[in-house]
Image (tube, grey):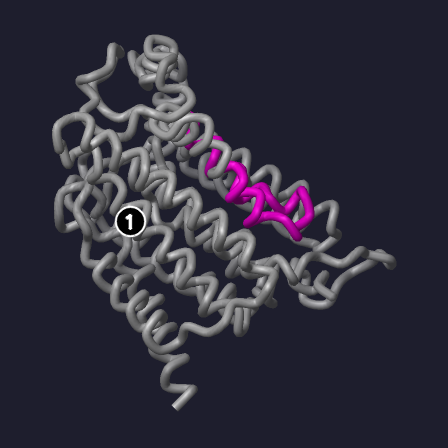
C-alpha cells in the first residue's frame, strides 16, 4: 500500500511538471497543470501528512507568517477601497504556492535525494518536450520574432527555462547523473531561453552557467573540463562546416542572430529603465513603505505604467511594505540555510531575473525554494583529498 501511495504522488508531480508549460487559459487563471497540483496537494494533506521534522519547522512558521501578512494587507485594502476584490485576487496565488511548498516538504522529507532525483528527470522531460516543439515548429506563433511556445507571452517561456535550469543544476548535486545528460538539460534550457529573447532571462542564465562552471572547477568534479571540451568541439565543428561550405553557419542561425540583435539593444528599449518597470511609484508614494499598498487597483498610483510593478522585490516592498519584504527575505534565508554559500546560485539568479520582472507567482520558484529547505541536511562535505571522483558529478561529494 505504501508503495502505491508513493507512486501516486510522484506520478502527479511528474504530470504537473510536464504540463506546466501548456497554457490553455488567459494568464492569471489556473491552467491544467494547476488542477493536477491541487490533486497532489489534497492527496498529500489527506493521506501523507505527518509530523514535520524539527529542522523544517522554522521554514514552515516563516511561510505561514508571510502568507498571513499578505492576507492581512490585501484584506484591509479590499475593505478600505469599498470591497474591491481585485486587491484580494493575488492572495490566492500566494496561498496556492505556499501549499505547494509545504507539499514538497511533506513528501520530500521522507527521501530528499529521491525527490531531488525525481524532480530533475521530470523537469528534464518537460524541457525535452518544449525543445522538440521548438525545433519542429509545433507550437503556435513559430514565425514570431520572440517565441512563447505554449505560454501566453515570451517572458513566461524565458522564466520557465531559467527556473528549469536552476532546478536541474541544484538537484544534480544530490544523485549520480551522467555529464552528457546534464549538458543536454543545460542545452535544452538555454535553447528555450534564447528562443524567448528575454534579456533578463538570457543574462541570468549565462551568469548562472558561468557560476556553475566555477563551482564545478572548485569542487573538482571534472564537469568543468568536460564542458570546456564540449564547447571547443562545438566551435570546431562550426569552423569545419564554415570552412568546407563557405557559409557563415553561426551568423545565418536564426536564434543566434535574433539573440544578438536583442542584446545589442540592451538599455535602449523603452522599457529598459526603472521608471518603465514601475519603480517610480515607490518614490511617488512613500506613505506605503511600512504597511504596503496591496496588489491591484494600480490606477490608484502615480506611475509611468498602470500595471503591476515589474520586479519581484520591488513589488513585494511596495505592496507589502517593510514587514512583508523582511518576511520574504527571512523565508529565503530559512530555505537556503544549511547549504554552503556557493550552492545558493541557482536561487540567486532567479532573484536577479526578478529585478526587472515580477516572478513571485511562478510556482517553480517556490518548488526550488522548497527543494533547498528539504535538502538542507544533505549539505556538501569538505574535500580532504583531491583527484578524480567516481562518476564525475556533484553528488559524489556528499557525505
**Quadrant assignment for the N terminus:** bottom left
Q: Residue 382, percent across and down?
A: 80, 56
Residue in front for this viewpoint, 232 or 224: 224
Residue in front for this viewpoint, 372 or 343: 372
Q: Quadrant of residue 12?
A: bottom left
Q: Quick check: 97 above or below 279?
A: below
Stretch in magenta: 329-356
Left or right for 53, reference 98: right
Quickly name the residue at label 1: 135
Q: Quick check: 123 above or below 209?
A: below
Q: Quadrant of residue 291?
A: top left
**Quadrant assignment for the C terminus:** bottom right
Residue in front for this viewpoint, 313 or 328: 328
Q: Residue at x 54, y 60 (%)?
A: 374
Q: Residue 305, percent across and down?
A: 24, 16
Q: Residue at x 32, y 74 (%)?
A: 46
Amino acid at each position: 500500500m505504501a508503495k502505491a501511495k508513493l507512486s501516486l504522488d510522484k506520478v502527479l508531480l511528474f504530470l504537473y511538471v510536464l504540463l506546466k508549460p501548456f497554457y490553455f487559459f488567459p494568464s492569471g487563471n489556473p491552467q491544467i497543470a494547476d488542477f493536477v497540483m491541487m490533486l497532489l496537494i489534497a492527496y498529500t494533506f489527506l493521506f501523507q501528512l505527518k509530523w514535520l521534522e524539527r529542522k523544517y519547522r522554522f521554514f514552515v512558521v516563516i511561510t505561514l507568517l508571510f502568507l498571513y501578512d499578505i492576507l492581512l494587507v490585501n484584506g484591509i485594502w479590499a475593505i478600505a477601497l469599498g470591497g474591491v476584490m481585485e486587491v484580494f485576487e493575488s492572495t490566492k496565488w500566494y496561498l496556492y504556492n505556499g501549499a505547494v511548498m509545504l507539499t514538497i516538504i511533506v513528501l520530500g522529507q521522507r527521501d530528499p535525494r529521491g525527490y531531488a532525483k525525481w524532480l530533475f528527470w521530470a523537469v528534464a522531460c518537460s524541457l525535452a518536450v518544449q525543445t522538440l516543439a521548438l525545433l519542429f515548429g509545433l507550437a503556435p506563433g513559430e514565425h514570431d520574432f520572440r517565441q512563447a511556445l505554449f505560454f501566453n507571452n515570451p517572458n513566461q517561456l524565458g522564466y520557465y527555462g531559467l527556473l528549469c535550469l536552476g532546478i536541474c543544476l541544484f538537484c544534480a548535486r544530490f544523485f549520480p547523473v551522467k555529464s552528457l545528460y546534464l549538458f543536454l538539460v543545460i542545452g535544452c534550457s538555454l535553447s528555450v531561453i534564447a528562443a524567448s529573447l528575454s534579456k533578463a532571462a538570457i543574462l541570468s542564465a549565462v551568469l548562472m552557467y558561468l557560476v556553475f562552471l566555477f563551482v564545478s572547477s572548485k569542487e573538482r568534479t571534472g564537469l568543468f573540463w568536460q564542458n570546456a571540451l564540449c564547447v571547443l568541439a562545438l566551435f570546431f565543428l562550426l569552423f569545419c562546416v564554415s570552412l568546407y561550405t563557405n557559409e557563415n553557419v553561426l551568423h545565418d542561425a536564426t536564434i543566434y542572430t535574433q539573440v544578438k540583435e536583442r542584446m545589442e539593444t540592451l538599455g535602449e528599449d523603452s522599457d529598459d529603465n526603472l521608471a518603465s518597470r514601475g519603480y517610480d511609484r515607490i518614490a511617488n508614494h512613500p506613505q506605503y513603505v511600512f504597511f504596503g499598498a496591496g496588489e491591484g487597483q494600480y490606477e490608484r498610483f502615480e506611475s509611468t505604467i498602470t500595471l503591476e510593478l515589474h520586479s519581484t522585490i520591488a513589488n513585494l516592498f511596495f505592496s507589502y511594505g517593510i514587514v512583508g519584504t523582511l518576511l520574504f527575505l527571512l523565508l529565503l534565508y530559512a530555505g537556503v540555510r544549511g547549504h554552503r554559500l556557493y550552492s545558493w546560485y541557482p536561487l540567486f539568479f532567479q532573484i536577479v531575473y526578478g529585478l526587472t520582472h515580477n516572478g513571485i507567482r511562478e510556482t517553480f520558484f517556490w518548488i526550488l525554494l522548497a527543494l533547498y529547505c528539504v535538502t538542507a541536511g544533505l549539505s556538501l562535505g569538505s574535500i580532504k583529498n583531491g583527484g578524480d571522483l567516481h562518476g564525475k558529478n556533484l553528488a559524489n561529494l556528499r557525505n
